[in-house]
Structures are given as structure tokens and as C-alpha cells.
Amino acid sequence: MRTTDQYEGMIAETIAVKGHGGDHVNAYFARPTGEGPFPAMVLFHHRPGWDEWYREATRRFAHHGYAAICPDLYFRFGHGAPDDVAARANAEGGVPDESVVADGQACADFLRALPTSNGKVGMMGTCSGGRHAFLTACRTPSVDAVVDCWGGRVVMAPEDLNEVMPVAPIDLIPELNSPVLGIFGNDDKNPSPQHVDQLEAALKEQGKDHEFHRYDGAGHGFFYYDKPAAYRAEQALDGWRRIWDFLGRTLA
């Protein structure tokens, strides 16, 4: 915890990271000033897109002492208002898993190569970003921690698979090498409490390090203070507390 006599500062800016297929993908990058060493986080934005909430979340991680980066996963669908770009991406079936994993891996490599890095990189996402964080952690052996906040379609039926999402992340758990923190609302429908049960059972069966926290009275997106119908202040505050505790133990 910082004290009132300490210097504090951060730098936040849009950069380009060489991602899937050699594309230079826009990413929002925030980091504390100072020599470090700092742990790092890759943030995967939600289905509404690369929006203000995720820029604020990226800066929040920098405030807590992490070098954090959030790539625009919808970069290849063009530019414009986040809602409009997200609508185009969703109309075309969503962003392919293959490009998400490659963009996430590129961001992790970028963070780990920073001279201020402590060598540890975690991943976090909410909603579809929770799925993407979990998926990328399974596909990327060097990830040190993953935070899945109500990620839907981690558990998938065979009929839900397609060219964009060819595999259910739950089936990749044997490849997972990082501890998992799961944050879920018991009133959510995607993932439902039953899906959360299935995911936790699979992690236990494979002997994977994990901890799940489930909140009564909370549904999908209960961290989103900009969406009054979804936001649950008490549950969100406790969820963030769990995140800082988990990452403090696994990355710092």
C-alpha cells in the first residue's frame, strides 16, 4: 500500500503491438513510473468492445503497481465508436479465437520484455473477455495467473462450436499451467451457476490451482458501474479485493 509521502505517477497511451498475422494492433498501455520491477497484466475487453471502462480498468491496474495493456481485439473490423465497431464484429460472428490468442500472447511477450518487468504476466477479462483470458492462458504456457470474471462460453455444447470458436476452453484445461481466480454472479445466465459448477469440477479433476467466488444478488457484469441495472457495489468491491489479493500472491 502506498503512503502519503510517496511519489506516484503513471503513463497511459495508445501503442501498437505486432499481433496475429503480423498485424499491428492498437492497444491501451498504462504503467507506473519508476524503475520497478513491476508485475504485468493483459486485459481482454468485453463484448461491448474496447471502451472507456476498459481504459479505466487498465489505468486502475497501473495505479496498483502493474504494467497493464488492453489490446483492441476488434481492430480488424475497422474503427469508430466502440459500440459501432463491436456491432460490426458481432454481426460477422465475433473475433476468432485464433487471433485473440495470438494478440494476447504478443501483449504478454511485450510486457515481459520491458526493462521494468519482474518477469510475471497475468491475464484478466470480463464477459467474453473472461473466456478469452482463460482460453489464452490455456494456449500460452508462460502465463503466471488468470482472472476469469463471469466468462461465458468457457463451457460449450458441441452445437455451439464453429469456425470462430472451434473448441470449448473447458476442454483445454489439461494445458493450463497458471492458477485461476473465478468471479461469478449467482444470478447470471451466461455462465449459469451450472456452468460454473462444471468448470470448477473440471479444474478439480485436473488438479489445477484455482479459487472461485460466487455472489448472491449479482448477475452478468456486476462490476460495470456505468450500467446501473447490472452494477452491484458491495459485490463488486469484494470482487476487486479478491483480485488484488490473488494477484498479489501470484504475480508480485
Image: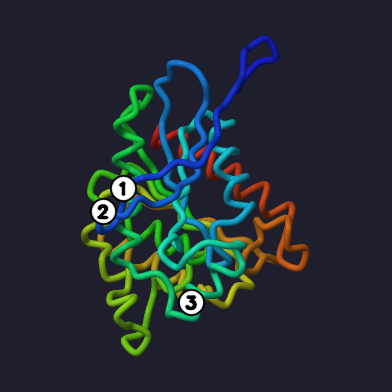
Which of the numbered marks, if any, corresponds to residue 210?
none
Residue plotted at (62% across, 62% down): 81
Which of the numbered marks, if any, corresponds to residue 18?
1
As drawn, is 157 to the left or to the right of 74? left
As drawn, is 5 to the left or to the right of 178? right
On screen, residue 197 above or below 182? below
Which of the numbered marks, if any, corresponds to residue 22?
2
Specify few, some or many for label 2: CA neighbours under 10 Å numbering under 14, 14-19, or 20 or more.
Answer: few
Q: Position of residue 227 (x, y in %)?
A: 73, 63
Residue plotted at (67% across, 9% down): 5
SS category of the residue bearing label 3? helix
Q: Are marks 1 and 2 in contact (CB under 8 Å)?
A: yes
Between 128 and 211, the one lying in front of the other is 128
Which badge, 1 or 3, comes first in the chain's sequence?
Answer: 1
Q: Are marks 3 and 2 in contact (CB under 8 Å)?
A: no
> For the residue marked with disc 3, what is the amino acid?
Gln
> For the residue marked with disc 1, what is the amino acid?
Lys
The residue tagged 3 is 194
